[in-house]
Image (cartoon, grey):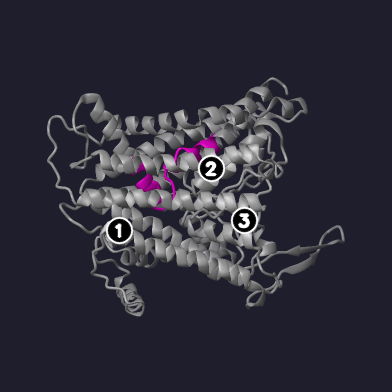
Amino acid sequence: MGALASNQLSWDVLQFAAFLVVLLAATPILGGYMARVFSGHKTLLDPVLRPVERLLYRLAGVDEKEDMDWKRYAAALLVFNGLGMLAVYLLQRVQGVLPLNPQGFGAVPRSLAFNTAASFVTNTNWQAYSGETTMSYLTQMMGLAVQNFLSAATGIAVALALIRGLVRRSARGIGNFWVDLTRSVLWVLLPLSLVLALVLVSQGVVQTLSPYRTVQTLEGGSQTLALGPVASQEAIKELGTNGGGFFNANSAHPFENPTPLTNFLEMLAIFLIPAALTYTFGNMVGDTRQGWTLLFAMLLLFGVTLAVAYTSERAGTPQLAALGVAAPTAMEGKEVRFGIGNSILFADVTTSASCGAVNAMHDSLTPLAGLVTLLNMMLGEVVFGGVGAGLYGILLFALLTVFIVGLMVGRTPEYLGKKIEPYEMKMATVGVLLPAVLILLGSAIAAVSKAGVSSLLNPGPHGLTEILYAFSSGSGNNGSAFAGLNANTLFYNLGIGLAMLGGRFGVILPVLAIAGSLAGKKAAPAGPGTFPTTGWLFTTVLAGVIVVLGALTFFPALSLGPIVEHLTMWAGR
């Protein structure tokens, strides 16, 4: 058994290393390509996509040369996403009379339809429903999958606006939202999704419009196999850091994630664009070291959380050990196809990247491993984070870091030559703290209200962790669920729905305000007193600021949840 455990440890570490090596190798390739796309340089796809792009602008009446100030950019973004949310809501409410509904599913209830519409428009993809028993094929494709593309493209657009704010000098405009949105979909998300979907189909992921099939089991009974256009939604689900599964079991379902190769590719797809955008950022600001610094800060935090979660899960629990279950083989809540290593890697990836896809049930993780998934979301989804959202989120922390360092050394804080003044700090503070307020306020109301606790299946600290996880997932726009909590109630549908909207647009608006403010400033050349924002010193300080802010904000809540549960577990209770 000892040799088996040692071999498994070596194999898991090798897979972790392979994952990071492939990710780092792909980062400058995709990041450089996106920099060309969004800087207006020619690419190999231009002959095919430029005519399509021009046609879309002509049909929509968009002037692609218009340079919007931040308020107009924000207004376009809010109107577009508001209309998208309305469309998804109405589609769910009338799906019963629409085609491509072979199972005859009726209208989605009002509160659940609101929650789901808010979820997919905000790139959260929190699912208080079971996909295979609730949504028609048409709703899955025309409503949810379309928003997977558009919400991811919205995140990229906001990141681009902030980059332009840092790059431009004495300018009013920060770009054109419609152009950023369109090019994100056509040049980045669609081609990558097409390639990944084809690979997934080749590995056995389902892609069909046929009705569900009823088959006979080996025991002589019958079982209904849910089918559908899964591969096409699975690809953008991961690449767009959406996370909304076609089936209730998400990426633990063999029709969504059938092989070790698909499991590896899906994890890679989750991190691919967020990692590459750091290189895009460095390229567009004229110093790729800036991008690598942000990436290594993300990797530093990711490596620590992965080590903690994996060590805790391999150690198992005294209760299972007493039943004769050896620690390294404790597989509760995990797929035997993937094992502990790939289950923990997937859990850390999905909660670090604001994705929400799962291949194991987080509710069954050891308390410390569950704490890691919870803390990843509480830190602001900046350890890679969502597509675009991770980049502008960690840039908010970078501005806070240079401001704090500037106060310590008595100099005016600067970032990329732009002075960081009280207005930027106020907006950055709002962007960083608003999700935390939503998490703690929503969890507090749920924990003391009958409507909140009536849905809990577990009492005590584990039940509190379930509530904290639900509001962290919603406010952080992650979307993964801890299980053990019935979230399909009026209280949670409305509460988490509002938290998702606040956590998304309550951060986007301050980011765009900062972009507009910085774009209007002149840049000062670096001097002897300028704090360098590249290198390991800034990487470490930036990571430290993120952790300290998260610890100060959430330590009391975590102490009452997973930390207490961990201590009682080892006390044999």
In the picture, residue 253 is in which quadrant? bottom right
The residue under label 2 is: 472
The residue under label 3 is: 258
Label 2: few (<14), some or many (≥20) within 10 Å?
A: many
Q: Give the x, y percent position of residue 226.
A: 70, 64
Q: Sequence order check: which comes first, mark 2 or mark 3?
A: 3
Name the residue: 48% across, 40% down.
Answer: 437
Q: Quadrant of the C terminus?
A: top right
Q: CA distance from mark 3 to mark 1?
A: 46 Å
Indicate the amino acid at tag 1.
Lys
Q: Nearer the viewer, residue 346 or 529?
A: 529
Q: Secondary structure at mark 3?
A: loop
Name the residue: 31% across, 49% down.
Answer: 279
Q: CA distance from mark 1 to mark 2?
A: 29 Å
Whether label 2 touches label 3, CB < 8 Å: no
Label 3: few (<14), some or many (≥20) within 10 Å?
A: some
